[in-house]
Image (spheres, rainbow, N blue to C red):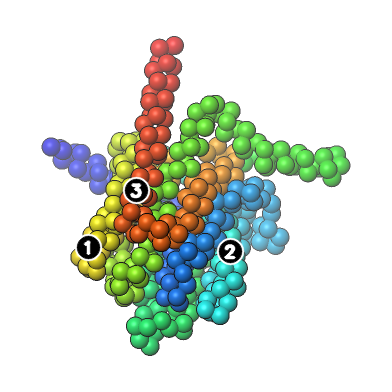
Amino acid sequence: MYSLTSYFSWLSGLRIYLQRRVLSIFVLGFSSGLPLMLVFGVLSFWLREADVSRADIGYFSWVALAYAVKWLWSPLADHLKIPLLHSRLGRRRSWLLTSQILVTIAICSIALTDPQQNLALMAALAVLLAFASATQDINVDAFRIESAEVELQAALAAAYLSGYRLAMILASAGTLWLAAIFSDGPAYDLAGWQQAYLVMGICMLPGILTTLLSKEPVSGLQQQQYTEGTAIQRFAAWLKQAVVAPFTDFFERYKWHALLILALIACYRISDVVMGVMANAFYVDMGYSKEEVASVSKIFGVIMTLVGAALGGVLINQFGIIKVLFVGALLSAVTNILFSALSHIGYDLMWLTLVISADNLSAGIATSAFIAYLSSLVNLAFTATQYAMFSSLMLLLPKFTGGFSGQWVDQLGYSNFFIMTAAMGIPALILIVVLASVKELSANKKAAN
């Protein structure tokens, strides 16, 4: 049994979440999480209600690939100054504010679009939203990593994830709930969805205010001035420092282990991301109403998300990142099997509550551990670029694969589809075990020398 001292030690560990820096990251995490479900999750519910095919919904999810290629423009966040805003806000906050304003404009623009009349326009606006949201993520991640020392990063990761997941629940359950309220009846009502999206645009204001009121972090990036030589020489020097150096630095630090790390990053979230593309379409096809899905997600989803994220941060401090990373990956795969069971059970609110609760708890633990793991890999000299590279790789394979999910459901049925996505989590478990073994062998070798 734990002693009284151990009990108070756990309580003292939780007080870290009340620090101002941690609370700021919580709000910025909320700002980052809000657009994702509006372009990736709840939008599929809207499209399915508008009688868009499952195959088209799957292809539509490819707009979220912007998150997977954000590393292409991430060096700009480390090196490019935003005119007018940079001198007043600094590098990180000026980039944050610009991306947050673009996100708000994109959400409100989608709210004025009708998918039945112009699906292509909605797709284009969704691409804009994904691009602006991915840019915001780049800078929130850099802001978070540069805002505190290594010892505080686990708490910042947990706070970020709590805000992120809370916003995802609001953007999904909240949008569904609002769309139901604003609709004239249970049937599809365009006006209800449009008004709900406008409210979500307003929900970006807390993140914008936090950006304006926060202090600019002290970047570890050693800026270089390229004032000598021709324009081509200056550009080449900038390209080497901003684009090439972050990638070569990672491989120089981790040698051949870098390949194992990149493989893990690429497949860690494939199980839940591929499943998530069809989740809302599944709810519609199973006969659940917007109000029912929203109510279950809002009550149990929020609670289990916050519990999972906070628990993940505490467990990391107690047992280390690798062990929690493995547990999170295992739980994420297992919860997909629960969705398969639900497809056989049929319409059942109790089972829906159980499945959504378990899914959010496991996602909270897994993502908290994964964010902390990615943060530990970053060199502060290239914060934005390297973290964007990792988080982009994390989404590239899952998002691309998820585009075919509609076809797979049509061919396999929901039950077999969910089982298939659970099996997709096995490679991540194997890679975590291999990396843990490699790390232990390296530690033993150093100790022996």
Mark number for residue 422?
A: 3
Q: Nearer the viewer, residue 204 or 239?
A: 239
Q: Residue at x 37, y 62 (%)?
A: 279
Q: Is 309 situated left or right of 147 in this image?
A: left
Q: Is 12 situated left or right of 205 in this image?
A: left
Between the C-alphas of marks 2 and 3, the distance is 28 Å
Which kind of residue does numbered mark 1 sit on? Ile
Which kind of residue does numbered mark 2 sit on? Val
Label located before the other in sequence (3 or 1):
1
Residue 104 quadrant: bottom right
Residue under circle 2? 127
Label located before the other in sequence (1 or 2):
2
Tell me the quarter of the image containing the N terminus.
Answer: top left
User: Mark 1, residues whose alpha carbon is within 10 Å: few (<14), some, or many (≥20)?
Assistant: few
User: Mark 3, residues whose alpha carbon is within 10 Å: few (<14), some, or many (≥20)?
Assistant: many
Residue under circle 1? 345
User: Mark 2, residues whose alpha carbon is within 10 Å: few (<14), some, or many (≥20)?
Assistant: many
Q: Residue at x 67, y 42 (%)?
A: 242
Between the C-alphas of marks 3 and 1, the distance is 18 Å
